[in-house]
Amino acid sequence: MKELELAPAPAADPAGGPPRRAPRVHYGWIVVGVSLLVLVGSAGFRSTPSLLMDPLHNEFGWSRATVSSAVSVNLALYGLTAPFAAALMDRFGVRPVVVCALLTISTGAGLTILMTSPWQLVLCWGVLVGLGSGSMAGAFATTISGRWFEARQGLVTGLLTAAGAAGNLVFMPLLAALVERHGWRTAVVLVSLCATAVAVPVLLLMRERPADVGQLPYGARTAPPPPDTDGSAVARSLRVLRQATGRRAFWLLAGSFAICGATTVGLIGTHFIPAAHDHGMPVTTGASLLALIGLFDVAGTIASGWFTDRFDPVRLLITYYALRGLSLLFLPALLGGSLRPPILAFVVFYGLDWVATVPPTVALCRRHFGADAPIVFGWVLAAHQVGAAAVAGLAGLARDSFGDYDATWYAAGALCAVAVVCCAGLRRQGLGKNGESPR
């Protein structure tokens, strides 16, 4: 699209000098490109444990509930790290935070090959990989889109969110094949090396703000106010949380997004492959279907970003959660030992809806919380990951107790109905002038 290629018309220099001729490509799109690479890698690294359940069970005798506990810690830290990472990016810069996060992932994945006990799995893949990937979670995408773009924020958020799906698309089939042919240790070593390699373009190309390259944010005509970087990043994160919790909108957004995490990353992302394998489907086929979900998620999330720039985000969320709930209720009848049209239809339908919720949720955070939106969304994302962590562990327990996942799919469909009610509450709350929510 032309707007992806051309920068806005020349504007005043952010430092107050005379107008500069705008370069043909706004540097914001280069930053988006680097961010896409980072987020693709982060998603691929974080999704790897779903491929390790059966190999670790076979080698060490660990139950699915035991392996799921590491996934739960990973998912919880992925969310709880996000608001602090957003504040750290404001305080110290995006580049150092992201590079440290990538090296933490590399260390955690690499040490996994030495483990002999479940607590080591929790430490390496739960704590280290969880902290590293959480530092590049949705708050990172919100920070980049908010700093570098005034126009097309919904589209950019959709692009960056879609990178998570692209990570599954790139890594899952490859890692599944490596696990099956060469063992799980080969796969985790590849993850470690890739995390280190991704840090290189971040060091070379990432810039903090448009003013660093003599530009305004894309679509802006005036320079934004200087960022608030005073004080402790932790203190600022907690202060924003305290203020946000006094707003009804925060609880409705956090509640609905917790259900989003429970019904996507926590359930499908963690348990779809072993659930399909229970029905006789090869692990590589299940991983390919999960990657295919990622392929359609790319299209769905980018489209959702485009829709968010044009339509009411509350209506979009109601639609997304309702459709997701219906698809999960049908899933138990669709799983089988082979690729049949019904399961392929589910993959397409569910994939389009996977994280389409992110752009409208980010837009509502901006609408209700203004300049604090990246940190607020970080806390909303924390709720997302707490929901994901809870269901990742509970679904493993349900599988061990009942021998299948059927009850889990039905419960997830019911949760989506609760999310619809939360979003309807946002709509009933209404907006004041200039899109501000009542306090």
Image (spheres, rainbow, N blue to C red):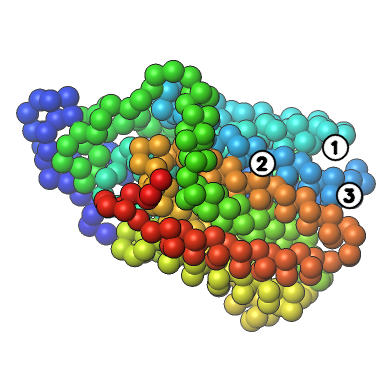
In the image, what residue type sits under mark 1? Pro
Quadrant of the image containing the C terminus: top left
Q: Earlier in the sequence, mark 2 or mark 3?
A: 3
Residue 421 or residue 272, whichever sits in front: 421
SS of the residue at dot 3?
A: loop
- Say which amino acid is labelled 3: Ser
Q: Percent from the top left, x then y, of residue 270?
A: 71, 54
Q: Mark 1 and mark 3: span between their CA atoms? A: 10 Å
Q: Residue at x 56, y 56 (%)?
A: 256
Give the image quarter of residue 117: top right
The CA span between labels 2 and 3 is 20 Å
Drawn side of residue 379 relative to residue 179, left or right: left
Point out residue 393 in the picture as x, y percentages from the top left corner: 77, 50
Identified at 23% across, 54% down, the residue is 3
Residue 237 or residue 94, whichever sits in front: 237
Front one among 438 and 415 = 438
Residue that label 2 marks: 76
Q: CA distance from mark 1 to mark 2?
A: 18 Å
The three-letter amino acid code for the residue at tag 2 is: Ala
Q: Name the N-terminal-most of marks 1 and 2.
A: 2
Q: Given the current orientation, which residue lies at the most extreme bottom position?
A: 341
In the image, residue 176 above or below residue 235: below
Q: Which residue is mark 1?
A: 118
Alpha-carbon neighbours of circle 2 within 10 Å: few (<14), some, or many (≥20)?
many
Q: 91 or 420: nearer the eye? A: 420
Label 2 vs label 3, nearer the camera = 2
Q: Quadrant of the N terminus?
A: bottom left
- Outermost top residue: 231
The circle on residue 63 is 3
Q: Earlier in the sequence, mark 1 or mark 3?
A: 3
